[in-house]
Amino acid sequence: MVEVRNLKKYFVLRGKGLWGKKILVRAVDDVTFSVQDGQSIAIVGESGSGKSTLIRCINGLVKPTSGQVFIDGQPVTLLKGREYREKVAKKIQMVFQDPVTSLNPRLKVFDIVVEPVLAQRRMRRSQLIDLVNDLLQKVGLDPKLSERYPGELSGGQCQRVAIARALSVQPKILLLDEPTSSLDVSVQAQILRLLNELRQNLHLSYIFVSHDLGVVRNIAERVLVMYLGKLVEIGPTEEVMDHPMHPYTKLLMESVFYPDPNVEMRKPVTLKESDGYTGTGCNFKNRCVHATRDCEDYDMSLIEVSPERFVSCIRWKEVNSWSN
Amino acid sequence: MKELVRFENYSLSFKTLHGKVRALRNVSLTIQDGEIVALVGETGCGKTVTGLSIIGLLPENAVYSGGIFFKGMKIDRETVRRIRGKEVAVVFQDPSSSLNPLYTVEQQLLDVLMSRWNMTRSEAKERIPELLKQVQLFDVDRVLRAYPHELSGGMRQRIMIAMALACEPSLLIADEPTTALDVTVQRQILYLLWELQRAKKFSVLFITHDLGIVAQLADRIVVMYAGSVVEIAPKRLLFTNPLHPYTVGLLNCVLDPRRKKLPEPIPGSLPSLTEISSECAFRERCGHAFDECSISTPNLVEAEPNHFVSCHLWRGQRG
């Protein structure tokens, strides 16, 4: 339903000083993947890996440098105006990380929720009221809150409003950019339950960005792991998390703290800190314990290691036999 | 083990235009010599102000009663000067806002050493490389000449830890030191902290909302809710036998990346801190609340050795 093909987004930065050299930042570098109807995928990676830029390219908030995004088979990159509303805004909506800053503080909840609808078409006031009441109930809010301002609501309530706003045009896909990372655990649990319910009832697809692997496990069927703009591993959630194959995914999984008092504190694999994009070859080679000369020329294309399972490591066989 | 810090019926409120905000209510807890105590709870439960109270970093409108004792000495406006930045050091959540952007790292480290130990500039300079190596920063020259913005988040937090340890404190307060960092860096920083603590035997008050970290790092856990301590227990006991309904709820909300299980949310939301008076703060969200709960705040009682809980229900069961 959503297909991303060879998507690239490069930013140009200035180096130190007024006459500093231009630096090319490859935020998203040749990413290809697709999401089926009703499927939920998670994109994980550390800050700066390009995961937010990637999903912003999908709904056009960021204009990609090259590559295409297809929604229901139609190319949608660089669409504007009416065509954009028809082909993108009706089908894809987004929920942002920080619910408090992503809602306009000067609008009432009612106006926030109907804004995307009114951008699409006109509606009578009475219809709008019904719509808002229905949406607020769907996301577990009291319809009376529609006359409040976001500043009067808690973080969890604001995030519910943001979800109601996203659902107002009956999209098929929600882009969720770390929707629970600014919330407390008890509220996070409520929002995750809600997202799960909504998905079943409304047959939604989620494209989900998160760095919390506990959240990922619960909400996604497939995981894409990103590192410095490149996809390094794709596969079903359980398989990737239980048996990571790319050295970076392995590192990520080893870094997680489990809520289990019987796990002993263990020494992390000491690696150099990320030093940004390295020019040629594998992005991860400077931090990787398995790197060899071969990695210098490897273009990081994904290798299918089993059905549905892709890894962008030229030494994946050695890496995985070595650790077993 | 000797007692290092003791909170005795410590209450704290802030006078605001909207009335009195009761940030802490009758907090009693202890930190022993050489242990890591984790303070867990959600936003607004008072974990950060508990830490700040020890070093007297409270705003003007704070009113407190009860007392905090450090090595048996009551902390007040005068005595706090003797411990702040000397016996007690702090590492805050956001390393970029706790370093001064206008000075180089070297200058800031020198300031700490010179004021803490009355060293001369050259004496202090000799100490610095050793401090940085302790926190695994080996590129000493580059780091020292750098301004904070030229370093990564992980490096800045290492420098904060180096500055704190330069004071050779007996208590380190770490207020969510890794929330702003990536998981891979977080693991490194926390391991570093843990290793240093094992080697130097200082006490740590570790403030966090992440029970995953707590499960591996802490010796004892203090759970707070809406300004009150609801449960105190050694790590293993708290996870295997939580007694307070809030602790049980909190543990059910925690996601374990190793298995798929939807969290069970605690119904309702946090009470307003201006409205709490004499009842149990968790009453409205608690599935077990009964009459007694709206009449009085339960006291912290020792339910089993080293395991304290403040819940009417628990006393009810026993009697």
Image (cartoon, rainbow, N blue to C red):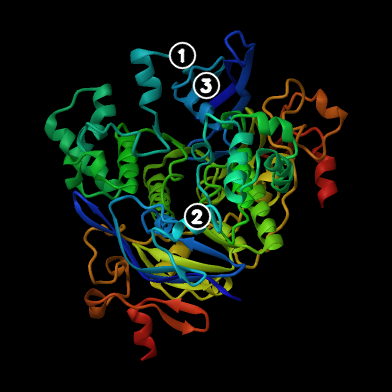
Instruction: Report the side of B231 relative to A269 (left or right).
Output: left
Q: What's the residue type where badge 1 is placed?
A: Leu
Quarter occupied by residue B248: bottom left
Label 1 to label 2: alpha-carbon separation: 57 Å
For this orientation, the residue located farthest to the bottom is B319
Residue B114, given in percent of the width and then of the height, sits at 61, 44
Vertical relation: B307 (above or below) A65? below
> Residue at 20% of width from left, 35% of height from top?
A108
> Residue at 72% of width from left, 27% of height from top?
A301
Q: Are marks 3 and 2 on the same chain?
A: no
User: Pointer 2 indicates a residue of which chain?
Assistant: B
For disc 1, the marked residue is A78
Label 3 secondary element: strand
Label 2 secondary element: loop
For this orientation, the residue located farthest to the right is A293
Q: What's the residue type where badge 2 is placed?
A: Arg
> Residue at 45% of width from left, 83% of height from top?
B303
Pick the quarter of the image with the N terminus of chain B.
bottom right
For disc 3, the marked residue is A69
Q: Earlier in the sequence, mark 3 or mark 1?
A: 3
Pick the quarter of the image with the C terminus of chain B.
bottom left
For disc 2, the neighbor class at 10 Å (few under 14, some 14 to 19, many from 20) is some
Please identify, in this view, whether the residue under mark 1 or under mark 2 is nearer the observer. 2
Q: Are marks 3 and 2 in contact (CB under 8 Å)?
A: no
Please identify, in this view, whether the residue under mark 3 or under mark 1 is nearer the observer. 1
Q: Are marks 3 and 1 on the same chain?
A: yes
Quarter occupied by residue B200: bottom right
> Residue at 50% of width from left, 46% of height from top?
B93
Residue A172, given in percent of the width and then of the height, sits at 40, 34
| Numbered label attached to residue B84 | 2
Is residue A7 visible to the viewer in this orientation of the structure? yes
Label 3 to label 2: alpha-carbon separation: 57 Å
